[in-house]
Image: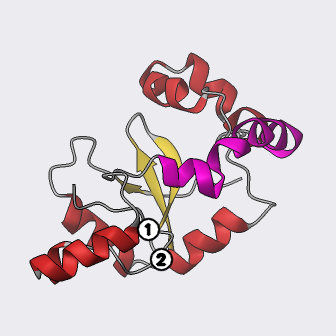
Amino acid sequence: MAKRQGIVLDPYGRAVPEEAARLRALGPLVPVELPGSVPAWAVTRYELLKSLMLDPRVSRDARRHWALYDKAAGEPGWAWLYSWTSIVNMLSTYGEDHMRLRKLVAPSFTRHRTEAMLPGCGRSPRVCSTRWRRSRRAKSSICGRSSRIRCRCG
């Protein structure tokens, strides 16, 4: 297999906007070289990134699906990458492991639990919408728009 030539990324990030523009100009999927001479791909288009993230054939589990994972553990210049890719959590697992971890955290993200985390004064939106109209602060408050939104006027 021939070695593909990748764009060498600046490890110090001295010109990130210019580097990103250069990668975008080269296409939606560009071979790059990460610090330590690690071969990788840079996705430069939102549409492609979204389709890859939603494709069940694409894995984020480097331990199971990255051919160079074992090399990353022993290569001195790749230590930064190994410590990042060896993390096991819901976002980095695949298949049954991902589903098992997802089921554990899903109850924390119901509508009621999420709304309870929103900052607010605790008053009902109706009370706050009356106060909002009286104070004429239309642009600085979101109260009164929906009965689902908690007051954030404080």
Q: Give whichever of discs 1 and 2 has the lower sequence position.
A: 2
Tell me residue 82's x, y (percent).
Answer: 54, 26
* Residue located 14% across and 80% down the image: 134
Corner quadrant of residue 68: top right
Q: Is residue 81 above or below residue 149?
A: above
For image coordinates 47% across by 76% down, the residue present is: 45
Report the predominant secondary structure element of the magenta stretch: helix
Q: Specify the label residue 45 is tagged with.
A: 2
Q: Which residue is mark 1?
A: 149
Residue 52 appears anywhere in the view: yes
Image coords of residue 72 (percent x, y) = 58, 27
Closer mark to the observer between disc 1 and disc 2: 1
Segment tinted magenta in the rendering: 94-116
Extreme residue toward the right, this view? 96
Q: Quadrant of residue 144?
A: bottom left
Three-letter code, disc 2:
Arg
**Quarter where residue 127 is shown:** bottom left
Q: Secondary structure at mark 2?
A: loop
Q: Along the horizontal axis of the image, is 120 left or right of 33?
A: left
Check the image and report above or below for 47 versus 127: below
The colour scheme applied to this rendered structure is secondary structure
Q: Give left or right: position of 118 versus 29.
A: left
Q: Please, what is the three-letter code of the amino acid marked with disc 1?
A: Ile
Left or right relative to 142: residue 73: right
> Callout 1: helix, strand or loop?
loop
Residue visible at 46% across and 18% down?
76
